[in-house]
Amino acid sequence: MQSKFSKIWFVASVALLAFLIGFAVRAARVPPNDVLKQAWMQARSTVEPPTFLKPRVHDRSGVRRADPDAMQDGVTLLTSTWKGPEGWSPRIRLINRAGDVLHEWRIDETALFADSLDLSRKHYLHGSHLLPNGDVLFNVEHGGTARVDACGNVKWRLPIGTHHSIDRAADGSFWVSDLTQSLRRTSSAYPDGYPGLEAAYFDRLTRISPEGQVLQTIGVLDILYGSDLARYVSKAYISGQQESPESDLPGTDPTHLNDVEPLPPSMADEYPLFEAGDLLVSLRNVHLVFVLDPETETVKWHASEPFIMQHDPDFIGDGWIGVFDNNRDFTERGTVQGGTRIIGIQPHTDSTRKLFPTPQSESFHTKKGGKWQLLDNGNLLLTEHHAGRVMEVAPDGRTVWEWIHPPHEGSTVPAVQEGTRYDLSPDDLSDWPCASKDFVRTPTPQ
């Protein structure tokens, strides 16, 4: 009996020692940390269903061209996840109006950001920006931002907690959403903590140079508390306390920054309250959109109505701001509130109008995510994130084109993070290095 207990104690001691060594390696980020991390991620993926797979909504897939003559010219960039012989991988694809793949980048997020990925978080592509020469910038959600060329060669990588959006400023720099990677409750502006707010992951507005250097950071909570807007955090935070532990409402994520967009100089004269370079910001969890002077960090305007957990506000001209209003309710397809909308608001007149849907529009709803783009011909390009659909609608609300992700095993579909139309022709793409319809390259660190 004594021998049996000795063996049990020995095995338990070895297991504990192995755990402590593994924990120390992970905490110190020393070899073989990266190997352990990738092994853990692979093991986890075999027992957990992929988080990017959503219940299938539409009974069709691929391209449907309801009215090709009414479409805006150009190619469409898609960011999503596709399954190949080697399994699922995040990819960026350029397609034409027929759905043909003109160019593709496959992203190995664990190879690119093994030093910054947090295993407790979801990882996928969220935010991208294509440059005319074929370079593309993208965020691996909460892992970092990278810039690769048309051949997939990595020009630089920035392993910080960027996510959601990338928007280019007039000087060539980029504004991104950024999340601190550790729980905090203080900042240099509030060394004793934000009153009433427990430890949280704090969002920042971050400006990055074309070469991948951080030029400026602005703390979102510093802005809200310093501009008498903390009441919005209080409202959302208190209501969030009543949610279940699985809720994605405020708790450790009090603001959920999902877009930062600078006002272009070419449009600035159309916005009497703002100046070129002012930032249009969206905070999902507090249902708040505001415009900020990034130099003085002064909020010039804000609105929380009529949005519910909105995304992607854009300056669209003539003093108007268009907002992707998820209009979220407690149903999967938005049947209580009527589905997702595009709302226009004109700050200097305090006017509001609905841009989409119209009585001629098809059902459209995504409770999370989603993006939109006002095209040059007045059409709207809409990303129905959960349904895996990108659709182009005319000003009267009619669908003139759509692309839907092929389903997985019949009942699910990969979410689409973004659909963006670029004014590029096949001839433009043929000037890129490594240009080929069938060309595929997986970016890896240099």
Image (cartoon, rainbow, N blue to C red):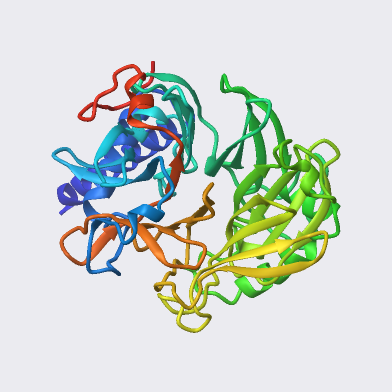
Residue 52 shows up from this direction: no
Say above or below: 299 vs 340.
above
Q: Quadrant of residue 400?
A: bottom left
Say above or below: 124 vs 48.
above
Which residue is located at x 37 percent, y 44 percent?
78
Which residue is located at x 68 percent, y 56 percent?
321
Q: Position of residue 292 (x, y in %)?
A: 78, 47
In this view, the residue in front, 289 or 379, is: 379
Question: Which image quarter holds the C terminus?
Answer: top left
In this view, the residue in front, 372 or 123, is: 372
Q: Position of residue 236 (x, y in %)?
A: 67, 69
Say above or below: 141 vs 369.
above
Q: Is residue 227 left or right of residue 390?
A: right
Residue 343 shows up from this direction: yes
Question: Which image quarter holds the N terminus?
Answer: bottom left
Q: Residue furthest toward the front?
A: 69
Q: Position of residue 377 (x, y in %)?
A: 52, 50
Q: Position of residue 342 (x, y in %)?
A: 56, 64
